[in-house]
Image (cartoon, rainbow, N blue to C red):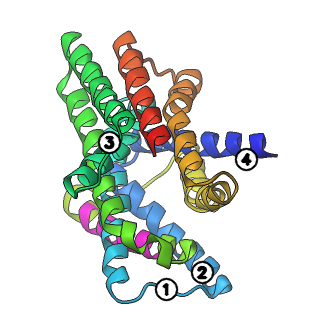
Amino acid sequence: MNLLLATLYVLMWGSAFNAARLVALEWPPLWALAIRFVAVVPLLWLIWWWRRAPFALGEDRWRLALMGAFGMGGYLACAWVASAHVPSGLVALLAACTPLFVALGEAWRGRRLSPLGWAGLGLGWLGVATLGLLRSADGLAAAEAWGLGLALLGAFSQALGVLAYAPARGRMDPWAANLGQTAVAGLLLLLLAGALGGSPPSSASPVVLWTMIYSCLVVGILGYGLFFVVIGRFGASNAAALQLMAPPVAAMLGWAFMGERLAWGDLLGGAITLTGLLLMFRAR
């Protein structure tokens, strides 16, 4: 049972990046993401209403709003736009760099890292630098550079949200928090799409339609539900470590079903980064 849960968890989070790329190649990414949030919020509200869970109070509301704006809205906006320019596996890898930014933020706040934690942090950033340098040496197109930069910016945005929300984490019901941050992210995405997203989509191929349904229901609802189950069964640290499998899964699915290819430098840099992240989780 545990193996099945872990496998479903990894497949769900890894395939989220493939779904984003499939949609972003046909629809304006910001509009697609805004539509996804608008569709998911009523479903999350029904779950919250059924649970009668308490909502955020006082200062926690601002922390939840920052998590929604940066940790979900800003992060996914960058990731979905990046998905229109670079393979799913690379977006997933750079999105997984969020803990590197979080660790830097915690160190800046005065939290002491163990020697193993510093080694993992250094190795993680070495992997990112290796990937970027080797991509540049092979000739990096402007669109690819834009996509890679956006994916990394998304990880930074998510780290800001995580750092802002962290003190309120133990005081909030998970489904109430998910509803709140999704509503804030949806509002932000509607504003971004209206200002920067171009014209909204006027038609949808069957692939995009089914992919959006998958992204809304499987990733947006079932994915978070499974996330809470996995945390309860394996613990937060092990659940976070399992997410390190998302980039390889996204890369393999992209190769098998979408014809995506990664250069040897991408694989080398990705392996170094994931090793560094694993060391950081072990240090915690």
Residue 94 screen position, x and y as percent: 35, 36
Return the residue at label 2.
48
Where is 260 relative to 91, above or below?
above
Task: Give the distance between the C-alpha atoms of the residues marked 2 and 1, in whole angstroms.
Answer: 9 Å
Where is 67 relative to 242, above or below?
below
Per the image, label 3 sits on a secondary structure element best described as: helix
Residue 95 screen position, x and y as percent: 38, 42
Q: Give neighbour class at mark 1: few <14, some 14-19, many 20+ (Cα, 10 Å).
A: some
> Which of the 4 quarters of the picture holds residue 31?
bottom left
Does residue 65 appear in the picture of this structure? yes
Does residue 154 appear in the picture of this structure? no
- Give the residue type at disc 4: Leu
Q: Which of marks 2 and 1 is nearer the N terminus?
A: 2
User: Which is more toward the observer, 283 or 15?
Assistant: 283
- Do residues under tags 2 and 4 come within 8 Å of each other at their CB atoms? no
- Give the residue type at disc 3: Leu
Q: Give neighbour class at mark 3: few <14, some 14-19, many 20+ (Cα, 10 Å).
A: many
User: Residue sitting at 49 percent across and 38 percent down?
Assistant: 282
Camera-near label (2 vs 3) is 3
Which segment did they paint magenta? Answer: 179-192
The question of residue 133 being in magenta is answered with: no
- Do residues under tags 2 and 1 come within 8 Å of each other at their CB atoms? yes
Task: Give the distance between the C-alpha atoms of the residues marked 2 and 4, in whole angstroms.
Answer: 23 Å
Is 92 left, or right, of 40 in this rendering? left
Return the residue at label 1.
55
Return the residue at label 3.
100
Per the image, label 2 sits on a secondary structure element best described as: helix
Residue 236 screen position, x and y as percent: 56, 54
